[in-house]
Image (spheres, rainbow, N blue to C red):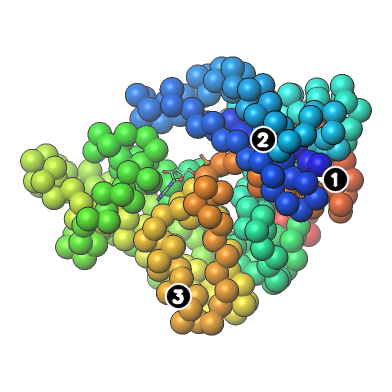
Amino acid sequence: MLVLGIETSCDETSAAVFRDKMLVSNIVYSQSVHREYGGVVPELASRAHIRRIIPVVDEAISEAGVSLADIDIIGATVGPGLVGSLLVGLTFAKTLCFALDIPFVGVNHIEAHIFSSLIYEDILTPALALVVSGGHTELHLIPEFGVYHLLGRTRDDAAGECLDKTSKFLGLGYPGGPVIDKIAREGDPNRFSFPRAMLESGDLDFSFSGIKTSVIDFFTSSGEDFVRSNLPDILAGVQEAVVDSLVEKLKQAHKIYPVSDIIVVGGVAANSRLREKLAHFCERRGVKAHIPPVSLCTDNAAMVARLAIFLFERNGSSPLSISAVPGLDIIQKGD
Ligand SMILES: Nc1ncnc2c1ncn2[C@@H]1O[C@H](COP(=O)(O)OP(=O)(O)OP(=O)(O)O)[C@@H](O)[C@H]1O
Ligand SMILES: [Mg+2]
């Protein structure tokens, strides 16, 4: 069975091919047009998807060594995401399915991030999953794949959004996560301390907007020259606050749900300090950590195709009448 996945929920145009359960191509085009604005401009994202969708799908098909006529199923992201961006990939996928007379499978982008952990390995359930991306910070208990129990989520900014806003404020560009990760490697994470919010809140929710505010206050009180000359230590401190908040809530969740497998996915899962601290925590607790390779943490169509295979085997195809749902939530246990 050959499955084509298409992902266009935000600012990556991506297409991937699976042969049965093996990933054979994954092309990701990251739009550079947003860099000068310090964040994604929705209309520019839609237009860039329109320009790139055909070349990206062509490249994924040819790298897989197949032709479009060989594809058996197409999966594409339905939501959550930017409506204009979602519509490009979704309409393209549905049109191809109609023309080729093959099944279409609509997928949830956050569930697809969770499935990025299943591309190269099998994972036992029950498991805990931390989704940390540009728009989401969510902790789920997964009794079995396809069934999710939301344990906690951010009350304000997502972890990636906090790093992106910090980077934008300091004039370091977009996306902020990779830049901060790189510069912070040269810094001392303990020299400056930034807030770790809600650690005593008694629930499993997160909050990251205080970090950004405290960076702004720090900048105002210390002055630009001081910030510029101590950037690695400051960024290491900011990154440490984000990472500690994530790992601490994961520890609290694991105390309540002592599962043997923990999944961490989404763009922020590419962070080297988070990967290091997670590995340490999981080793101490005797838990298996499942974190995808860095290239599969940020948006990609491989995870979309992987989830489409699972959904097709379980539920069959989706109707072609399905439309983009920008605020789509992951299906909860009992929904
Ligand atoms: N090495 C890294 N360290 C920390 N953050 C990173 C790293 N690499 C990428 N990120 C962050 O990951 C985010 C992008 O991840 P992703 O592509 O999964 O998010 P998104 O698709 O925009 O949002 P969502 O999945 O919630 O809709 C950005 O906020 C970016 O700064
Ligand atoms: Mg994403």
Identity, as a three-letter code, of the amino acid under mark 2: Glu
- The secondary structure type at the circle numbered 1 is loop
Characterize the local packing of mark 3: few (<14), some (14-19) or many (20 or more) Cα atoms within 10 angstroms: some
Residue 107: x %, y % from top left: 73, 42
Nearer the observer: mark 2 or 1; the answer is 2
Identity, as a three-letter code, of the amino acid under mark 3: Phe
> Marks 1 and 3: CB-CB under 8 Å?
no
The residue beneath circle 2 is 63
The residue beneath circle 1 is 1
- The secondary structure type at the circle numbered 3 is helix
Sooner in the amino-acid sequence: mark 2 or mark 1: 1
Residue 255: x %, y % from top left: 53, 79
Characterize the local packing of mark 1: few (<14), some (14-19) or many (20 or more) Cα atoms within 10 angstroms: few
Characterize the local packing of mark 2: few (<14), some (14-19) or many (20 or more) Cα atoms within 10 angstroms: some
Task: Kindly indicate the quadrant of the structure image that contains residue 29.
Answer: top right
Which is more toward the observer, 83 or 73?
73
Tell me which residue sits at (53%, 23%) in the image.
45
Identity, as a three-letter code, of the amino acid under mark 1: Met
- The secondary structure type at the circle numbered 2 is helix
The residue beneath circle 3 is 281
Residue 273: x %, y % from top left: 37, 61
Q: Quadrant of the C terminus?
A: bottom right
Above or below: residue 287 compared with residue 158: below
Nearer the observer: mark 3 or 2; the answer is 2
CA distance for labels 1 and 3: 39 Å
Mark 1 lies within 8 Å of ligand 2 (Cβ measured): no
Q: Residue 279: tell me if it is visible.
A: yes
